[in-house]
Image (cartoon, rainbow, N blue to C red):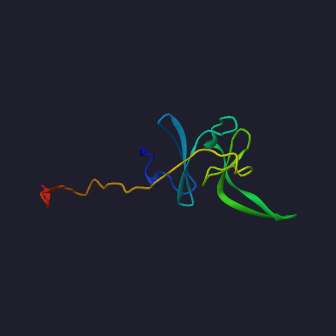
Amino acid sequence: MAKHLVCKISELPPGARKIVEVEGRSIGVFNIKNSLYALRNSCPHQGAPLCLGKVKGTMKSSKPHTYEYVMDEQVLVCPWHCWEFDITNGRSVFNPHKMRVKTYEVTLEAEEDPSIETYEVTLEKGLVMVHV
C-alpha cells in the first residue's frame, strides 16, 4: 500500500477536512477531535460528493420519549439525500450492517526539519560508518 502526502497537520486543525485526489480517487480526510479519518468522497447511494456534506452528531433513543445527542462531530451527512455515515468507520448510521462508504488508513508522520544537519551512515563489515 503506497503512502500519499495530504498536508501538514497544521493545515488540518480539529474540525477541518481536506479533499484530495489519490490514484484517481477523490478522498476526504477529516480531523475529528484530533483523530484522523479518510473516506471515499462518493456516497454509495447515488455517487454524491459525500465529503462536502455537513458534519454533526445524531440522536439516540433508549426508550420512548427519551433522546440523547451522541456521536458529536462524527456523522457525515450526504449533501444530496441526507444519508448519514459514521466518519470513524464509514458505516451508515441508519443501516450499519449493509451500507457503508470505503475508508482508508491515515497516519501522522514526523516531518523532517531541514535545519537539522544529517550525515549518511552505512554499515561496512560490521562497522558503523558516518560519511561527512
Count every numbered label the image shows and give the total: 0
The residue under the point 76% across, 59% down is: 59
- The furthest residue to the front: 125
Question: Which residue is at a point 65% across and 35% down the rendered structure image?
Answer: 47
Relative vertical location of residue 25 with respect to residue 122 in this rendering, above or below: above
Could you say which is closer to the camera, residue 37 or residue 125? 125
Q: Does 112 sit left or right of 62 as displayed?
A: left
Residue 117, above or below 51: below
Where does residue 12 sit, x and y in percent of width and height? 50, 52
Give the quarter of the image for residue 9. bottom left
Q: Position of residue 5 (x, y in %)?
A: 42, 45
- Image height check: is 20 above or below 15? above
Quarter of the image for residue 64 reads: bottom right
**In the visual, does 2 lie left or right of 49?**
left
Q: Position of residue 82 (x, y in %)?
A: 73, 44
Who's the residue at 68% across and 54% down the image?
A: 56
Q: Quadrant of the C terminus?
A: bottom left
